[in-house]
Image (cartoon, rainbow, N blue to C red):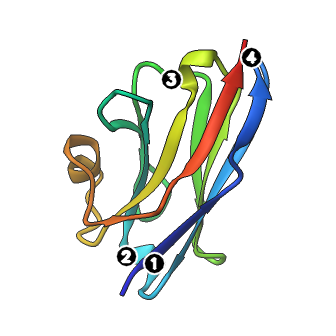
Amino acid sequence: QVQLVESGGGLVQAGGSLRLSCAFSGRTFSNYAMGWFRQAPGKEREFVAAISRSGGSTVYADSVKGRFAISRDNNKNTVYLQMNSLKPEDTAVYYCNADPGGSIAIITKRGGAYWGQGTQVTVSS
């Protein structure tokens, strides 16, 4: 079974940076499109970014475009989310997501089948 374990969250001041990591195990990582979602208190979970199986294609939510970068290392079975110029409104629990069909489109529309437990990111003003 696929397991996703996020790390790298924490408390940072506005304007700062964090890099989230998601370790994938249980299946062949390079067969899966990957993504990141987030959920702020009192709000629905929302799409943040997605990356294709090879890493050659990426998609971002408008709210993070130009500030966040998703990447993956298929040798390390890990997907990353580099977050720069953080804002207080980026405060949320961030979740890693995987689609077994390898579809970025599915991730952007509703998320793939597998989810991590989440890591808290708090941005202070």
- Report the residue at 43% width, 30% height from top: 41
Identify the residue under disc 3: 65
- Report the residue at 70% width, 27% height from top: 84
Identify the residue under disc 4: 14
Please determine whether, in this image, residue 23 is positioned above or below residue 59: below
The local crowd at label 1, few if under 14, some if 14 to 19, many if 20 or more residues have their Cα within 10 Å, is some
Identify the residue under disc 1: 3
Contact, CB < 8 Å: mark 4 with mark 3? no
Distance between the Cα atoms at labels 3 and 1?
28 Å
Q: Earlier in the sequence, mark 2 or mark 3?
A: 2
Identify the residue under disc 2: 31
Q: Quadrant of residue 77?
A: bottom right
Which quarter of the rendered picture does the N terminus lie within?
A: bottom left
Contact, CB < 8 Å: mark 1 with mark 4? no
Q: Nearer the viewer, mark 4 or mark 2?
A: 4
Q: Position of residue 35 (x, y in %)?
A: 42, 52
The local crowd at label 4, few if under 14, some if 14 to 19, many if 20 or more residues have their Cα within 10 Å, is some
Contact, CB < 8 Å: mark 4 with mark 2? no
Could you tell me the amino acid type at mark 2?
Asn
**Element type at marker 3?**
loop
Could you tell me the amino acid type at mark 4?
Ala
**Element type at marker 4?**
loop
Disc assigned to residue 114? none
Q: In this rendering, does residue 58 appear at all?
A: no
